[in-house]
Image (tube, rainbow, N blue to C red):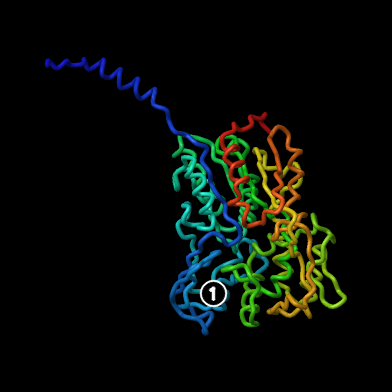
Amino acid sequence: MKKTSVPFFVAGMLMSAASVSAPVDVRTPVVVFPAFHLTTLEVKVHKQTAVPDCPASGSFEDWFPNPNPGTEFSQVCRDRLLTLVVDPDKSLPMVSRFSNQPGVKVKIKHYGDTESAPFYEPLYAFLESHGYVRNHNIRVAGYDSRLTPDIGSFLEKTKELIEETYHQNHNTPVHLVGHSNGPLYIQYLLTHTTQEWKNRFIHGFTPLAGNWPGQGLLYSVYFTGLNIIDFTFPTDAANAASSAAMYQTHPSSYMSSADPAVFGDQETVLQIGDISYTPEDHQQLFEDANLPLSQDLAAAYIGLVKFNEPQNFPNVDVYAEKGSGLDTLVGLGLPDLSVGQVVDFDTAPLFIRDGDGNQEDLTNDAIQVWQNMPCYHFELNDNAGVDHFALASDAAVLNRLLTHLQQPKSVCPAS
């Protein structure tokens, strides 16, 4: 059979036609911002002498829910080595006053990749089942949960990750998904970038129970501690003391504490005998407890992330989710104001509000003010009976997310 040759220019035309007709598989890429301590931190210790009772060298990981924390470093040692050093020199800018313990280095493990936040495996798998690819159009903007977004290189690294994701996905604007504290870091980003940058790189924003004005329960943690490995209160005095002292040095603790500008005196966060403290009493609380460092850091970091005035609106499309209908602990009764108390839940007074089991209604409802954003879309979906940690894997939430990812972004007049 005679072989028929195809002229070169005809072959080229056929190839061009094939390439034009072949569809490009473009999906709105997603960047996930994890919740408080759901980013994997890799801690390396080398010849440390700051905590003599703990190993001088070695390594461990800090994240929820780490199933294999190891035995090299006890929980108390992990707390003490993750306690920040705060320079007492108040003439320095606040963001420059924090450092790790000497001999301790902390970094985000697998930054940018889904491996950096294993808790969100159901979210990744759901997106994969709809054609997404991990570490291509699903990325993770992890952060050191001890720190606030004004410290270090958070802004620069996060913008770089978003821009990289945009370019690697055919210049497609990126959708930001945050859980719990994650939305605070997103909101800080969106209010510290230009509208021009957001118009180009951001498709929209899905906050899952954003911890906007903080929550009441954090005030108890300054006295009782909280173990990240399982988010339970310590059950022995040494662990309670090491954990509580650690949180007192973390600026994110205060960013996550109920902001009196929103909460006022609407809830009791701590009760000592006949004395009740509300969020608006926080400075008196720290003074009464003789915690001058907490007074200092609270003044700087409570209410750090602004959100409820028009000049602080995110000015992108927002598809918010919350849980409700669950008893949510917002405060405790304690015998006194000593640091390192083990809570007896059989006898301690408990102060409860409606919420998602972790954050109260005052927190979860605070962003309703964003419905006043001109032009940009806003919705807040209530998932009754769905708890805080289940939101990121709830079928209805995930299906709405997929729908929102497929919707065009609002085109609004230049601000």
- Quarter of the picture containing the N terminus is top left
Q: Which residue is mark 1?
A: 78
Question: What amino acid type should be assigned to the residue bearing mark 1?
Answer: Arg
Q: Residue, x 43% and y 30% (percent of image)? A: 24
Picture coordinates of residue 97 (x, y %)?
61, 66
Residue 123 horizontal/vertical position (percent) = 54, 49
Nearest the camera: 50 or 350? Answer: 350
The residue lying at 45 percent from left, 47 percent from top is 134
Q: Is residue 389 left or right of residue 166?
A: right
Decide if residue 329 is on the left or right side of residue 232: right
Asked if residue 196 is positioned above or below residue 287 in the image, the reply reads above
Q: Is residue 349 above or below residue 215?
A: below
In depth, the one of 379 and 175 nearer the eye is 379
Residue most extreme to the left: 1
The residue lying toward the viewer, choosing from 80 and 34, is: 34
Q: Quarter-wise, where is residue 173 in the image?
A: top right
Occupied quadrant, residue 361: bottom right
Quadrant where the image shows the C terminus: top right
